[in-house]
Image (spheres, coloured by chain):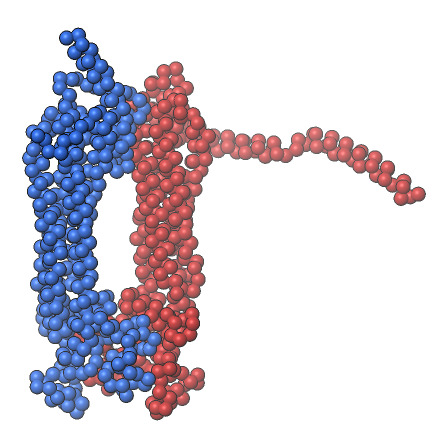
Chain colours: A blue, B red
Amino acid sequence: MPFLSLKFNLQKRVKLAQGLWMLYWLAVIVGIILFSLGIFFKIELRKRSEIMDNNESHLVPNLLILVGMLSCGLNAFGGKLCHDSLDPQKFSKMKPMLRPYMLLCCGFNVLLLLLVLLSFLMQFAVYLTLAEGLKNAIRFYKDTDTPGRCFMKRTLDMTQIEFRCCGNNNFRDWFEVQWISNRYLDMSNDVVKDRVLSNVEGKYLMDSVPFSCCNPGSPRPCIQHHLTNNSAHYDYDHRTEELNIWNRGCRQAVFSYYSGIMNSIGALLIFTIVLEVRLRPHCRSQSVTCVLKGTELDSQTTVTYRNHFALPFFFWNFILFPLRLIAVSMQQKRKQWREIHILLVEKQELL
Amino acid sequence: MALLKMKFSQQRRVRLAQGLWLLSWLAVMCGAFIFCLGVYLKIELLRRDEVMEDTDIHAVPNLLMLVGLASIGANWVASRVCQDSLDASRFPRWKVLLLGWYAVAVLLCCLLLAVVVLSYALQGRLEESLKVGLRNGIRFYKDTDVPGRCFQKETIDRLQMEFRCCGNNNFKDWFEIQWVSNRYLDFTSQEVKDRIRSNVDGRYLLDGVPFSCCNPASPRPCLQNQLTDSRAHYNYEYQSEELNLYSRGCRQALTDYYMGLMNSTGPGVLSVILIQLSVLLSMRYLQTAVDGAMALESPEGESEGYILEKDVKATYAEVKAKALDLLKFAQVDPASEVAGAEEGEKAAEASAKAATPPPAS
């Protein structure tokens, strides 16, 4: 008892072939999109690996690149298979490859499902890595003379400017860390000595933030220093001031960016799975029911001027004119098969 | 003696038609590319609209968009002509259109060349426009409560951060204007009063810059205020400090950016010109070869293709003669003109004689 069997006459088969051709090329394009999305995600992770402690997992983008390449290859082969299924000579050559191809496609679908799960679950890992990485980045902000951490300041400044955020949870994270290097502190100054002596670890703490926390949309020039001291600035109340510096924490900002990317990857993968699942049963029925035994097709198809363009059509952009190609060849083949069918019927009557 | 004659067998004609069909679709893609390039350039110019005084430079993207659209249309027509060229019944209807098509193709190539020339020639105008626009932007930086200028501060801040520049020519431009609004100045403070009295216009000038001038690559936290005073900060030397702020002026940065954009599109535009010219030449060969084939007794035989039927001088003389003929046709014939003038005079005299007696009486 065949699984999901459908009846197909010639007309239906032709329409099916046309539709399948388009679907296969759509699947190849989706494969290319997945591949480029994987590369994009990998580059984005590498760009900010410094604020993630160089500890981030590249599992999802690597798998995505693999899946993209596999998808292109499998679907291009499948498209060729579908196209050849209408020509009995070529099809008989392809027949032995059909079963292993179907098995490979099933394995590919399982891989896609796994990747969908990963792209939603790995977001937790990204969140945790970000939290730890940002905490260290703020601590090492001042170490511009320590090898291995020279560019932490620049990276963190650029991140805060780009993502419009300040600190880990909010701007008060900067109050708890010494972010000015001792090289630029005048230790003979009384103010400096007071601040250093005011806490157990001898850190120079202040209620100020770096310039990259400033919000350009504020109507007044940025107030960076003495943020909690209302009397230090004219017409300033730190409890009601909202636009001066960014309110959001960088962990939240960067995480929502990455989770957006991973969610759209997951959505695209689900679309790909649906596409693949729809393609398999149709192509199988198309190729299996379309075998005409013992017939020789007339190899001399028409010599209209349009056929001169068959070769450029084939090598040109498949997306532009595949239907036209199939339609032209289908019309001729349909006529011939009708003649053959009549001949067969007559033969049977004679017998 | 035809110009650049070549022999075309049926096989070669078919190959030429196929090749030209592919080439014309490639030219359609190139036209679309030119159009997208124009759109991209226009969007980039519009984004920085607020710091540009006039819009002369917009001629370059406008021309690119126009040429892109025209090129798509013309090359699509070329591909249709190709498809019909091997069918003797359908080709003759394109004959008249082809002359017009050649003119359009030559015009497109000339316009593309003009775009390349313009993009270099308008650099001076762009710099002037940016100079005035940025000067106004810096002057109105503090006016965040004046309608129409509320967002000047945000625009300038984002511009300085994105293009890594400070001020118009350099950061000292900020020392010459008041960029802190009066709303945030405490006029009872002695320091504020001193600064305002120190200059004729009563402006609050300081040797400080906004935060958007800060360079994140500096090893020390940004110094924004009292920049010229080496004693105000520990371990700071005003003359030798390089990394603290951006050293480039925004006018230079923006000019470099736009010139870079337009220069990088130069090779692309030149290759599109080459493709368009090759489509033009191939079309001419195809037209003459197919015409020649249709005139033969056996259409499958060999025919000749050429660019011009006679050589350049003879063709020029022929075109000139045709043009003069047209002009002569428009002019009235001299002999009949004289006869007509005499008749006209006689008629005028007769009517004058008829007209004069009544007033005399």
Q: Nearer the viewer, residue B342 or A36?
A: A36
Residue lying at the far right of the rendered structure:
B361
Q: Quadrant of the C terminus of chain B?
A: top right
Residue at x 34% of width, y 47% of height: B34
Q: Nearer the viewer, residue B307 or A56?
A: A56
Decide if residue B52 is in sight here. Answer: yes
Residue B181: x %, y % from top left: 37, 80
Horizontally, is B352 left or right of A285 in the view? right
Residue B152: x %, y % from top left: 37, 70
Residue at x 18% of width, y 55% of height: A263
Q: Where, by quadrant of the figure, is residue B192 drawn?
A: bottom left
Q: Nearer the viewer, residue A264 or A5?
A: A5
Q: Quadrant of the N terminus of chain B?
A: top left
Residue B356: x %, y % from top left: 87, 41
Q: Above or below — where is B140 with respect to A268?
A: below
Q: Where, by quadrant of the figure, is residue A176 drawn?
A: bottom left
Q: Above or below — where is B187 with respect to B164?
A: below
Q: Nearer the viewer, residue A255 or B220?
A: A255
Total labels drawn: 0
Residue A102: x %, y % from top left: 9, 36
Decide if residue A180 is in sight here. Answer: no
Residue lying at the far front of the rendered structure:
A1
Residue at x 11% of width, y 25% of height: A92
Residue at x 43% of width, y 59% of height: B55
Q: Above or below — where is A260 with respect to B140?
A: above
